[in-house]
Image: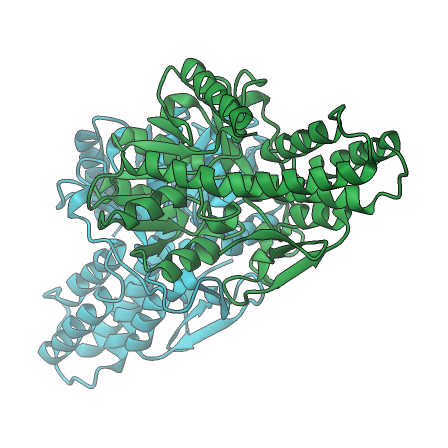
Chain colours: A green, B cyan
């Protein structure tokens, strides 16, 4: 199941806001609509919005009426700004748009049509690489999943959060494919319920044994010995190993450590941002109050109530057992291990070209 | 605002399932309906269901067609069984029905009408005492709330969880009445949203500054230094100080300790159950999957999904700074301090008679 792709000059994606009730595909021929789709969470998940950013740049190149290289680059830089501003926390978005812009700026590409073609090819490469990267992460991650493991999983990190397969859910898929007899505790992930709506749907489709819980039940399961490993994705990893991920991750990681339960973030190396020394430098997106006060148009809190709705939190590195990537698993001290894996990933991309 | 009372031979209570949208009163003339109202959470909160149990016994005495003391006691013992089975975790229910049954068994009461009158009087005493107890808890508790405190509160522990005023919310009310300029972070408390629906409503009515958050945001607030004290109620406290409270309490208490934030349970001594050595002996109620998969008739998870829905969790005593009661604050070692406060409470009740 692919979340986002290019077809007939348009970017197509699953409208994730309608799941699990309806599976609908939306199509965009304007990069500004792609940016809006990211903001409105038609598509979400750090690697998936990375791919959306890449396709958005390819779309912007196609839309541009520029007749020369300089004009097109100007339009692309403007499109990059619009796309990057769609959501602030996940670094994959600007990682992907930067990668596309660098292609556009290649000195050997002088013709606007050549740039347009190169950008579409690069966007397709970003998407294809994401799937390959997820499969590699799955293979590395499955090694630390014991047979019969009861895995606690937060938010959605599956096919829907990526181009296909998934990060933490990719590890779960790989462990399941290896016949490890796992069981997944899926927390619902308030306020947007990505666990209840998306992860439960993906796991049920794949026949992977799972049970849905309220976020509040996770601590009880850990304390009573019913969780063997905690897995989640991340939207940005700082140089010291601090991770920004969906709100609620921090509480899970603290309780995991308190109960001696291994706890891993699963991310492509594109999520690692070595330019930030630690998690306190990662911008935390605050979203609208209605995500908390309304569910599908049903009001669940008094009219006029004041709300604070941060979309992410920071989990300091000391709560993590390891960070699983497509180049292997980073263990403490993360400052060194993350840099090594990031360099390995950058070397791999160059050698592939 | 009183949650439950006796009027014209009936038990009346606010139907809490309709709040904050509608404020409706229901009336019962059959103790079995009172038991059902407790199970269905028309009324909830440990002290409130204690009062409901007491009024239910008074109703059972009124309903009984027994002509003699023995017949009436037989009917009352049967009613006690039905009421006690309504919900398993909160000890206040059986604490109240036991107290009422003891009155009925008093050797000086031989006439069935005298027993009926004595039971109604005792039920009224349980309810009145609950209000007085909450005010005393509020006064003790307010002493540990600093000026300007930012308080994190779980579930509903207010007027609606008691007969009036509240336990943890009583402490908040008292601190507010003392002009302490407090602010309350109200977590929504999935799955039944008592925080979003009830606590937000109570605090807004009283003009106490508050902000609603998803449960998942609590850890982020604690880690970033925005919480000065954590307060919640409890449904049962074991002899060693372990507390059973609304699911999610454990994660809060662990994160509070991790961040050096004082964390208190606020309970009447009737919630302390010295007959149980520790929290692992407290029965944990599991409720229906629909509490997690449906919100006001709206489905938020795939059809047929498997759900685990424990209503409470156990917070081991080591995460608690203290346990606030109407006889003072118990500090570690709790085994001694709780016994002392429980004895003081029992002495007080006897001397009042």
Q: Is residue B117 above or below residue A315?
A: below
User: Measured along the vertical axis of the image, is residue A141 above or below residue A34?
Assistant: above
Residue A212 falls in image quadrant: bottom left
User: Residue A226 location in percent, x, y?
Assistant: 23, 45
Would you identify the image quadrant in which residue B269 lies? top left
Label total for image: 0
The foreground one among A5 and B15 is A5
Q: Work out whether residue B195 can be spotted.
A: no
Question: Residue at horizontal 68%, vertical 33%?
Answer: A100
Q: Is residue B199 visible?
A: yes
At 28% from the left edge and 76% from the top edge, which residue is drawn?
B32
Residue B197 position within the rendered picture, expressed as x and y whole percent measured from the top left: 52, 56
Residue at the spot 48% in from the left edge and 33% down from the top edge: A268
Q: As rendered, which of B10 and A182 lies closer to the eye?
A: A182
Query: Residue shown at 57%/46% (left/top)?
Result: A44
x, y percentage for residue A74? Answer: 84, 31
């Amino acid at each position: 199941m692919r979340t986002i792709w290019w077809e007939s000059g348009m970017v197509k994606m699953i409208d994730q806001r309608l799941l699990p009730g309806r599976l609908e595909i939306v199509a965009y021929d304007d990069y500004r609509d792609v940016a809006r789709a990211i903001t409105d969470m038609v598509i979400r998940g750090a690697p998936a919005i990375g791919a959306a950013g890449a396709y958005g740049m390819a779309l912007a190149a196609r839309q541009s009426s520029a007749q020369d290289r300089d004009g097109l680059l100007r339009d692309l830089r403007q499109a990059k700004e619009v796309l990057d501003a769609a959501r602030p926390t996940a670094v994959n978005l600007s990682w992907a748009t930067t990668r596309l812009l660098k292609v556009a700026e290649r000195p050997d590409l002088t013709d606007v049509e050549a740039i347009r073609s190169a950008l579409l090819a690069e966007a397709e490469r970003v998407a294809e690489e994401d799937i390959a990267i997820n499969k590699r992460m799955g293979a590395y991650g499955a090694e630390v999943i014991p047979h019969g493991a009861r895995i606690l999983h937060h938010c959605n990190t599956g096919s829907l959060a990526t181009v296909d397969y998934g990060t933490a859910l990719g590890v779960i898929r790989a462990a399941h494919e290896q016949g490890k007899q796992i069981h997944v505790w899926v927390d619902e992930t308030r306020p947007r319920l990505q666990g209840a709506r998306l992860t439960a749907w993906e796991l049920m489709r794949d026949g992977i044994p799972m049970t849905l819980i309220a976020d509040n039940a996770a601590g009880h399961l850990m304390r009573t010995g019913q969780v063997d490993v905690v897995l989640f994705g991340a939207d940005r990893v700082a140089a010291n190993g601090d991770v920004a991920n969906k709100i609620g991750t921090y509480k899970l990681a603290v309780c995991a450590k308190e109960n001696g339960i291994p706890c891993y973030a699963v991310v492509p190396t594109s999520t690692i941002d070595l330019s930030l020394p630690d998690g306190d430098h990662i911008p935390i997106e605050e979203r609208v109050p209605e995500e908390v006060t309304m569910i599908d148009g049903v009001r669940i809190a008094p009219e006029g109530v004041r709300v604070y709705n941060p979309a992410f939190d920071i989990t300091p590195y000391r709560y993590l057992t390891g960070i699983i990537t497509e180049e292997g698993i980073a263990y403490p001290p993360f400052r060194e291990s993350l840099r090594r894996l990031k360099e390995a990933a950058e070397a791999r991309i160059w050698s592939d070209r």
